[in-house]
Image: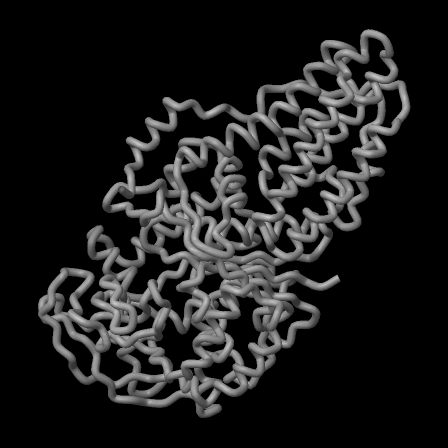
């Protein structure tokens, strides 16, 4: 059994995430972590807030806060939001930690010693009105390659090309909007990617065809265009001071220390129980570790090119990513989520409107895997009302209420499994096999299609067997049918657990079970699980699992959260 190391793009500390951030990396990583745990694998799932850079400085300035206090506050807000969404991190840390500083310094020293760090005098954009050098992402203008008018100074999110701020057409400060910019000389340190390009290309080649197309295509595009040295220092105050003589007044670029943060956060986790844990077991000279990363396509270049090259350049045996799940974007009714323009629903608000599992199911059944996807309240309500309320919720309520009223509040005894049950078992075994296959392959939309189809098979079964009619003439046969249906509820709960952990626990609770009672998803056998709950096992009917979303509620939400039109 291998160890599974799971990471996702680290959310920027400023602001709160919207649904696109949740589905782009955080939620799929959680679902995969929960799934692998249910298979009996040893999992370490870590994440944390990305805290350095101009983003934090400007955010603190706008809110008139000390930058450390600003980061402390938003770290707590992030942590609470992810807890509300039932994200099951083993540890949620911070890139500003002393542990990350220690490892960042070590990696930089190795790169410098091995000749992959070079000094350059460069020209950077200085905002006269803001009285500061502008970090790349705080300069916006028109992309010289595709003409996108809101390209940032480090990368165009439209065509994904990496840029230098001086390449932008009609540049302006993102902080003040001022176009009163000057280009001034300043000395910086660069990671010499061209010297690492050959080794990196060989490493990436080993990932074909195992990486999904979004990640592999972007990585190959970068290599084809030829790698350029990347500046890894900045003229800022907030960040790790550079540990090299002559550069003490500069800090490391956030995109240098942030990915190293995966290692630093793991060390934070290990330091919490040093007698039991060693971060090196997962990252340095580690044995039998499979590293899986999740992130939006805009983050793919840094995790498929820059960070792997950084680790290769140390000459040490660091754990590299084995599978990089790149996701496309989720839009709001075809447009962008925007907190300032009050358009789109953000995670903190979403959880106040509906329980987490409503969002978890919708987001993953519409995950932007191969291409961008769009969120809209009409679509959201349609899926919740049909899949969750009518298919799953109705089956659970119908079976338990019927059994309690017609027989008793316990799994009924009597009767044998006949041809309809044998056909059901065969059909479900195929469906479950496909569901588990897609979950293994992290093809989440396909997996959820199979999960819904499994629920539908339960509804089809009870419709064909008609226990409410059979019980009038053959109580034993009706008991056998309802016993199978109650066991289906347990099967549905187990299979749904990675996607909807709270709903799964509620279904199990009605059967007198807890999540700890769930069987392993490894070698899951429907013919065995269909008879797992024995006659006489008590159950409770409980409240309805889901609430139908009314047309009035949909209109209220549209008014409340705006429209992209």
- Work out whether 70 lies above or below 102: above
User: Quadrant where the N terminus lies?
Assistant: bottom right
Q: Picture coordinates of residue 196 (x, y %)?
A: 48, 86
State the image quarter where residue 239 is shown. bottom left
Left or right position of 211 against 21 = right
Q: Tell me what residue is drawn at x 23 percent, y 44 percent.
A: 341
Q: Picture coordinates of residue 35 (x, y %)?
A: 65, 49
Any part of residue 58 in sight? yes
Q: Tell me what residue is drawn at x 65 percent, y 66 percent.
A: 290
Q: Tell me what residue is drawn at x 25 percent, y 67 percent.
A: 147
Left or right position of 155 against 448 = left
Q: Picture coordinates of residue 170 (x, y %)?
A: 15, 69
Any part of residue 237 in sight? no
Left or right position of 179 against 8 = left
Give the residue at the far top of this rendering. Answer: 472
Number of residue marks? 0
410 or 452, nearer to the observer: 452
Left or right position of 541 against 247 = right
User: Quadrant where the C terminus lies?
Assistant: top left
Q: Tell me what residue is drawn at x 65 percent, y 52 percent.
A: 438
36 or 457, nearer to the observer: 457
State the image quarter where residue 316 is shown. bottom right
- Work out whether 395 lies above or below 337: above
Q: Picture coordinates of residue 302 (x, y %)?
A: 44, 71
- Work out whether 180 lies above or below 534: below
517 or 483, nearer to the observer: 483
């Amino acid at each position: 059994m291998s160890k599974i190391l799971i990471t996702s793009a680290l959310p920027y500390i400023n602001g709160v995430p919207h649904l696109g951030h949740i589905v782009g990396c955080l939620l799929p990583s959680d679902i995969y972590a929960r799934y692998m745990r249910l298979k009996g694998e040893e999992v370490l799932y870590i994440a944390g807030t990305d805290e350095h850079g101009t983003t934090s400085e400007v955010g603190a300035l706008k809110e008139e806060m000390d930058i450390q206090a600003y980061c402390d506050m938003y770290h707590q807000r992030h942590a609470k939001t992810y807890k509300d969404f039932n994200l099951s991190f083993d540890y949620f840390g911070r890139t500003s930690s002393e542990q990350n500083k220690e490892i960042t310094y070590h990696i930089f020293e190795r790169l410098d010693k091995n000749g992959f760090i070079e000094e350059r005098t460069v020209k950077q954009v200085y905002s006269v009105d803001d009285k500061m050098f502008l970090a790349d992402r705080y300069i916006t203008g028109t992309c010289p390659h595709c003409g996108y008018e809101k390209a940032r100074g480090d990368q165009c999110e439209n065509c994904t090309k990496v840029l230098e701020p001086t390449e932008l057409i009609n540049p302006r400060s993102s902080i003040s909007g001022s176009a009163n910019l000057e280009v001034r000389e300043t000395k910086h340190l660069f990671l010499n990617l061209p010297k690492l390009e050959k080794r990196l290309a060989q490493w990436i080649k080993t990932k074909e065809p195992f990486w999904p197309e979004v990640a592999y295509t972007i990585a190959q595009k970068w290599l084809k265009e030829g790698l350029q040295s990347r500046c890894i220092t900045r003229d800022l105050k907030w960040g790790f001071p550079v540990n090299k003589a002559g550069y003490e007044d500069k800090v490391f670029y956030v995109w240098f220390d942030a990915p190293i943060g995966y290692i630093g956060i793991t060390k934070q986790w290990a330091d919490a129980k040093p007698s039991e844990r060693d971060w090196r077991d997962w990252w340095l000279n580690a044995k039998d570790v499979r590293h899986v990363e999740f992130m939006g396509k805009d983050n793919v270049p840094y995790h498929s090119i820059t960070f792997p090259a950084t680790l290769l350049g140390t000459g040490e045996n660091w754990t590299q990513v084995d599978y990089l799940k790149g996701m496309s974007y989720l839009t709001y009714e075809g447009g962008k989520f925007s907190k300032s323009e009050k358009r789109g629903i953000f995670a903190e608000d979403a959880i106040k409107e509906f329980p987490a599992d409503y969002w978890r199911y919708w987001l993953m059944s519409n995950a932007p895997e191969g291409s961008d996807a769009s969120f809209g309240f009409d679509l959201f309500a349609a899926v919740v009302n049909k899949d969750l309320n009518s298919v799953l919720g109705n089956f659970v309520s119908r079976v338990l209420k019927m059994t309690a009223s017609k027989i008793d509040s316990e799994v009924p005894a009597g009767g044998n499994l006949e041809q309809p049950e044998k056909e059901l078992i065969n059909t479900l075994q195929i469906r479950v096999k496909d569901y588990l296959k897609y979950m293994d392959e992290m093809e989440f939309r396909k997996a959820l299609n199979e999960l819904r189809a499994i629920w539908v098979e339960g509804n089809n079964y009870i419709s064909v067997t008609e226990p409410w009619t059979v019980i009038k003439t053959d109580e034993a046969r009706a008991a056998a049918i309802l016993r199978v249906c109650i066991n289906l509820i347990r099967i549905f709960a187990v299979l749904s657990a990675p996607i909807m952990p709270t709903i799964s626990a509620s279904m199990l609770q009605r059967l007198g079970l807890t999540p700890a009672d769930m069987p392993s998803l490894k070698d899951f056998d429907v013919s065995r699980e269909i008879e797992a709950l024995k006659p006489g096992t008590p159950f409770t009917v409980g409240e309805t699992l889901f609430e139908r979303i009314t047309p009035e509620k949909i209109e209220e939400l549209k008014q409340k959260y705006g429209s992209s039109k």
